[in-house]
């Protein structure tokens, strides 16, 4: 038996195909049937996402416009004009600031609230439900509510601030050039924190209580317990949430447009809003396509960095 096993092992090393199990005809038919079942859904996805994407990429190489019936091929002219235009880099930098600040605050505050709501206290279930309201509320309602609350003439926030200091009662949150961007970021964080909180709350449930108790027996405080036990177990969730919310915030159009439409003086103009303005107000479809493609490239680079980091950390571990 030993000699036979040695011969088989040598044969497999010399011919790797001998060690691979062969699929039976029934297994092949099952896989083919599964692929056929997936084809309708895959076709719909390709039609709804792939075709528009290819159309936008193709338009970015033309001078297509809503007021010009025939489009001409211009090559990389749209991209060259954008990359040499200072307003593009202003908008790009503002988009990065908007995305980075929103993601950082949504993660930090979401983790903080998750840790608070992970403790046992009376009314915990009710508090968890209340915290979810900002996320489940439609974006248009969120924008209108905050525009009313932060109105410089009759807003409830200015009314409360005026009771403290009358000079604060006329603060123009959405129309002040120095406050507008930070105000919209605050509203965006307020809406996004509940979702990150729920994700982190689910992750906290999976942290082994035995490890927490063992660290507590060793005399570790809450901060050390968080850094040595809780945070390492949430590392994968943190990275995933960071990627998802980076893509979500970078492509966020509706909240900014409904709140300020990019104003005042383009102080809240980010890439998705600018792309919309160029296409449907400037009527320049080809130029808007270049804006959209550069957004896509930026997101692809961010995702590539993320997956490269994940791959490296897995190899190290």
Image (tube, rainbow, N blue to C red):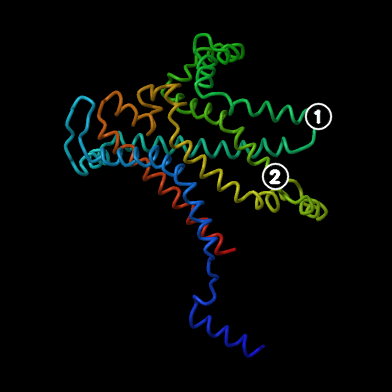
Q: Position of residue 44 (x, y in %)?
A: 42, 39
Which is nearer the eye, 206 or 94?
A: 206
Q: Distance between the residues labelled 2 and 1?
A: 19 Å
Callout 2 crowding tier (Cα within 10 Å): few <14, some 14–19, many ≥20 = some
- Name the residue at 58% across, 11% down: 159
Callout 1 crowding tier (Cα within 10 Å): few <14, some 14–19, many ≥20 = few
Left or right of residue 110, residue 13 in this image: left
Q: Mark 1 points at which residue?
A: 122
- Name the residue at 50% across, 37% down: 101
Q: Name the residue under label 2.
A: 204
Which is nearer the eye, 27 or 179?
A: 27
Circle 1 sits in a helix, a strand or a loop, which is it?
loop
Decide: is 180 above or below 271.
above
Which is nearer the eye, 134 or 217?
A: 134
Which is nearer the eye, 178 or 310?
A: 310
Quarter of the view holding residue 189: top right
- Name the residue at 52% across, 81% down: 13
| Residue 285, numbered label | none
Quarter of the view holding residue 7: bottom right
Left or right of residue 209, residue 192 in this image: left
Decide: is 311 above or below 227.
below
Circle 2 sits in a helix, a strand or a loop, which is it?
helix
């Amino acid at each position: 038996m030993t000699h036979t096993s040695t011969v088989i092992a040598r044969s497999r090393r010399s011919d790797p195909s001998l060690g691979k199990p062969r699929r039976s005809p029934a297994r092949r038919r099952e896989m083919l049937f599964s692929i056929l079942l997936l084809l309708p859904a895959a076709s719909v996805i390709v039609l709804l996402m792939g075709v528009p994407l290819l159309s936008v990429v193709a338009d970015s190489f033309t001078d297509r416009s809503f007021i010009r019936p025939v489009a001409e091929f211009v090559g990389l002219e749209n991209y060259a004009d954008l990359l040499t235009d200072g307003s593009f880099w202003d908008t790009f930098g503002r988009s990065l600031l908007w995305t980075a600040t929103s993601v950082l605050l949504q993660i930090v505050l979401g983790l903080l609230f998750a840790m608070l709501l992970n403790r046992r206290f009376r009314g915990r279930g009710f508090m968890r439900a209340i915290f979810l309201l900002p996320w489940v509320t439609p974006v248009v309602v969120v924008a209108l509510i905050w525009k009313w609350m932060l109105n410089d003439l009759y807003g409830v926030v200015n009314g409360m601030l005026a009771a403290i200091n009358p000079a604060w009662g006329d603060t123009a949150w959405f129309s002040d050039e120095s406050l507008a961007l930070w105000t919209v970021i605050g509203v965006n964080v307020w809406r996004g924190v509940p979702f990150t909180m729920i994700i982190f709350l689910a992750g906290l449930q999976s942290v082994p209580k035995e490890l927490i108790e063992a660290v507590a027996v060793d005399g570790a405080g809450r901060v050390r317990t968080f850094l040595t036990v809780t945070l390492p177990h949430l590392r994968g969730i943190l990275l995933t949430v960071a990627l998802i919310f980076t893509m979500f915030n970078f492509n966020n159009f509706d909240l900014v447009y409904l709140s300020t439409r990019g104003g005042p003086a383009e102080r809240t103009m980010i890439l998705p809003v600018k792309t919309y303005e160029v296409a449907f107000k400037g009527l320049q479809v080809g130029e808007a396509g270049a804006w959209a493609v550069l957004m896509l490239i930026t997101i692809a680079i961010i995702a590539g960095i993320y997956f490269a980091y994940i791959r490296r950390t897995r190899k190290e571990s």
